[in-house]
Image (tube, rainbow, N blue to C red):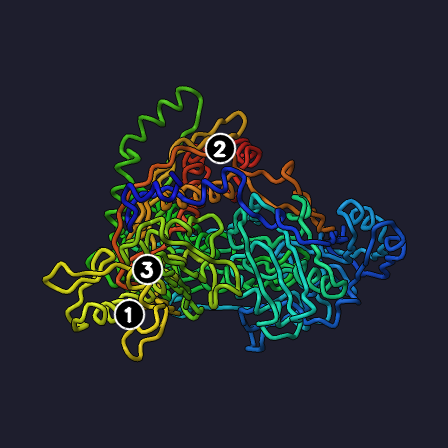
Amino acid sequence: MPHDQGQALIATGIGAPVRRVEDLRLLRGLGRYTDDLDLPGALHAVFVRSPYASARILAVDVSAALALPGVVAAYTGADLAHLAPLPCLVPRQLPDGRPMPRPPYRALAVGAARHVGDPVAMVVAETRAAALDAAEAVAVEYDPLPAVTDPAEALSPDAPAVWPDLPDGNLAFRFALGDEAAVAAALARAAHVVSLDFRMSRITANPMEPRAALAEWDPGTERFTLRSGLQNPHGTRDALAAVFGVPAGSVRVISPDMGGGFGMRGQPTQEHVALLFAARALGRPVRWAATRTEAIQSDPHARDQTSTVELALDAEGHFLALRCRTVANMGAYLALMGPLPPTNNLGGLAGVYRTPAISAEVLGVFTHTQPTAPYRGAGRPEAIYALERAIDLAAVKLGLDRVEIRRRNLIPKEALPFRTGLVFTYDSGDFARGMEIALAAADWAGFPARRAEAAARGRLRGIGIANAIEISAGPPRTPQDEGAEIRFAPDGSATVLLGAHNHGQGHETVFRQMLSDMLGLPFHAVRIVMGDTDAVPYGRGTFGSRSIVAAGTALKEAADRIVARGRRIAAHLLEAAVEDIEFEAGRFRIAGTDRSLGFAEIARASVTPGALPKGEEGGLIAAAIRTPQDATFPNGCHVCEAEVDPETGEVQVLRYVIADDVGTVINPLLMKGQLHGGVAQGLGQALLENVVFEPGSGQLLSASFMDYAMPRAADMPPVEILGNHHPTASNPLGAKGAGEAGTVGALPAVVSAVVDALSPLGVTHLDMPLTPLRVWQAIRAARG
């Protein structure tokens, strides 16, 4: 029996733990990733990348490369300089109100290289081996210059300028939010103020499948086609059309299976532009796939901020105000959504607490590093980390238990809807209940005995807590509309065209579940189509935990329109009034009778001449582009328990508990999988991952998995997930989103646990990543 037909034997609607239908294909090697695709006559491209973080490009000589066998073409920045730069869609301002500078982000560097891995030339050959040889033969004359990679150092008056012609040095923008005067007044009158300077480490996404692309030009239709793993095919199409100065309809983007996105695949890249240019110039398809080192050198990176957070409290430990000041690394160029992560999700600084006054300031700076872009959480983990670390420090200063200080400040359920001290208004949830569920499951009360047992073994044991909340299908002022279309075949099966796109979440499964539930269709009778701008007329893509909320809202509207059309057709066929037709479980029935029709009869009639009511359009098809009524706020309490070996600094995370509220749960198996993955990525940043540059030269020192530590199965503890779900009224499904929730809470929870383990030594904070060396050094320093 086919796998998806077997699903019909069990519950398959909303709330059912349906196994992912994608897995049968992917686990048998039947997935179609970008590098699996090929076209007749396709050429291979290899990029020549700068080995310097900052250097003038004095000359690029491709003559030796062109003389090699099998080489078809070689291009430099000058060849592509007439194309428009890659855009940035997030406008910001300088302190005096002038628009943020937008230095040209070109496909190939012109005049100067501004980070290690900046592409300087591209060679195209009949085979990848020939292209690699040709790339080695390209002679580039550089004049190396000093580089700056640290965001705080970039603001120094004597820091090397990334863009010497900009009048404001390396400052890209200033962004402020909140009532600064009210916060300053609260800080001045507070009985207690805690302050923490911290670094949010720089990381890179490292999906299983490195970036790849296959570009094609059709001279007959004068259209580009780009095949590449992307989270937002329609947005990428529009951006690339602007670069080439052609209508959006002249670019087709196809996004096949992809091995993870995490925000990194949410923008057009330099390689996309160069490959499309070459495909048109040569009249042949051109393909490229990054090596892992090349990916780390050229992928957008993430996070990388220095911050100061201040929390004001009264004598009893109630929060009065919070202020956070951040310097955010934008890299050498502004990515499509580069300024978004440090600025658009600052509302998360309110957390789940009643803090009345909150303000934030962000300075974006240019450095000689890869552009930064959204990464799982995109500003949400940064905000919650700042808040929760400050709360832990406040508990130490006031001599309060970390749980008790949180209890005193939680927003009570009866206060909802609650407008926080910064931007957000929470509509639903029970934050206190969630924390109590997590504490009980983690046996917080029994921790002292476990700590004593660990001490008897010579280990330091700690427990950490973090209350996390994030915005989903947001943030405000960002377009959140999404498209969905349902098309019925005459046999009653349905095809769903989705603007959202799957890159590991399980869309092929959950949207089948949703339509099965909405229309009473057999699970196997629904097919999902996405990731092709020619097949799907409209879409914004998948990011920000928005798919279920945004695409689900559009799908519900389209399903309602199908039902409305079906009732009209059924009324005509059954010779009844439309008002007398009831719809339930996939059948249109005359109320109070056993006379009914299913979707097969309705769909067949919709394409049968003469079978429809007068004025009714043919075909059982409905589409909707809808925007959720408001953002949603998934939330949860994370408790982490860890041990430290004081002789080596090694950290072992022993247990992890989450009490989570994602509203309506469409599929509990997939929801838990999303949380597990989020925790893994948060744990990876907290303990292991770090992009490192050599000071002065800006050389990238962590460009392979020999130097960039990724979390492995042995690093992950058992993760227990408990429900505290409160559906939202802001969308018809009641869903809140789950894709980033695990990461948002994991950073502060893991760090809290490790710092608690070290607290008997007087350690109150350590910056991420908490590597064995960093922990061991902290222990040595604490012991004098």
Q: Compare marks 1 and 2 and give the one earlier in the sequence.
A: 1
- Percent across and percent down for residue 696 are 72, 51
Q: Mark 2 falls on what kind of element?
A: helix
**In front: mark 1 or mark 2?**
1
Residue in the picture at 70% in, 60% down: 275
Residue type, mark 2 in image: Ala
**In front: mark 1 or mark 3?**
1
Q: Mark 3 falls on what kind of element?
A: loop
Q: Quadrant of residue 81?
A: bottom right
Residue type, mark 3 in image: Thr
> Residue 565 shows which numbered tag?
1
Q: Mark 1 falls on what kind of element?
A: helix
Residue under circle 3? Answer: 355
Residue under circle 2? Answer: 713
**Residue 388 to residue 655: above or below:** below
What separation in Å lies between label 2 and label 3 (alpha carbons)? Answer: 38 Å
Contact between labelled residues 3 and 1, with CB atoms less than 8 Å apart: no
Crowding at mark 2 (Cα within 10 Å: few <14, some 14-19, many 20+): few
Q: Compare marks 2 and 3 and give the one earlier in the sequence.
A: 3
- Percent across and percent down for residue 58 are 85, 61
Pick the residue in front: 586 or 380: 586
Residue type, mark 1 in image: Arg
User: Does residue 594 appear to the left or right of 697 in the view shown?
Assistant: left
Q: Compare marks 1 and 3 and give the one earlier in the sequence.
A: 3
Residue in the picture at 26% in, 50% down: 725
